[in-house]
Image: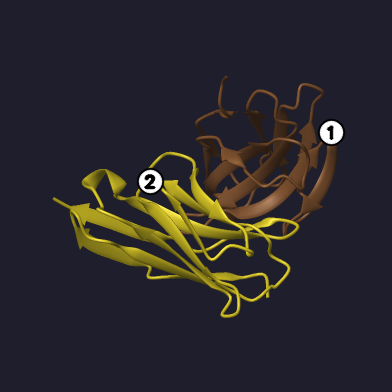
Amino acid sequence: ETGVTQSPTHLIKTRGQQVTLRCSSQSGHNTVSWYQQALGQGPQFIFQYYREEENGRGNFPPRFSGLQFPNYSSELNVNALELDDSALYLCASSLGGPIHNEQFFGPGTRLTVL
Amino acid sequence: QQQVKQSPQSLIVQKGGIPIINCAYENTAFDYFPWYQQFPGKGPALLIAIRPDVSEKKEGRFTISFNKSAKQFSLHIMDSQPGDSATYFCAAKGDKLIFGTGTRLQVFP
């Protein structure tokens, strides 16, 4: 059984650019959640995908968007990057839909916006 | 009302000590309270979790105490070891998982 994996590990972009981050969920998990973790802070919920549909969203603007694929892997897209978007982006997978609670996190993608 | 307040911000103990980390919440709709451990450069790892119908849960050296009426819960680490040095996050889940701000724990030999 493989855990949650994310790519790339690190990424450097400039203001105004667009970025796509990728996540492969743990084997058998059909729900993926994305979080933003600024330096020295706790993770903040961006959104969740269940069976390829967005199912819950945190307080993030529409330039943060996502996808979930039939194999349950997921992408996070951020348009028009701002300096404050610099953070660790975490993906977490869970089993059985939004009511199931245990979430397993990947190692994250460190995004730096210059 | 969606916040989870965590204290202290940092904690230093000697090996064998019992660090205690506290969290408080307002939203009574929260129904699941996990604790995560995060090492530098890694994602958070689930340590232990509790539901509000239970007042205490132990797993190995980790214990959660839960006070539903006070809307507070805490993590105790028994016989702490240098390898426990990490950042600990409490969290609470209703329709989404809300994290506390984290406690950086350092355990010295």
Q: Seen from this angle, which residue lies furthest left? A: B109
For chain B, give the colour. Answer: yellow
Q: What residue is at 37 percent from the left and 70 percent from the top?
A: B8
Q: Nearer the viewer, mark 1 or mark 2?
A: 2
Chain containing mark 1: A
Q: Position of residue A58 (x, y in %)?
A: 73, 57
**Left or right placement of residue A79 versus residue B17 in this view:** right
Q: What residue is at 71 percent from the left and 35 percent from the top?
A: A95
Q: Position of residue B69 (x, y in %)?
A: 60, 79
Mark 1 belongs to which amino acid?
Answer: Glu
Quadrant of the rendered image containing residue A50:
top right
Q: Position of residue A32 (x, y in %)?
A: 71, 38
**Left or right placement of residue A105 versus residue A62 in this view:** left
Mark 2 belongs to which amino acid?
Answer: Gly
Residue linked to disc 1:
A52
Residue linked to disc 2:
B60
Q: Measured along the vertical axis of the image, is residue A33 above or below residue B10?
A: above
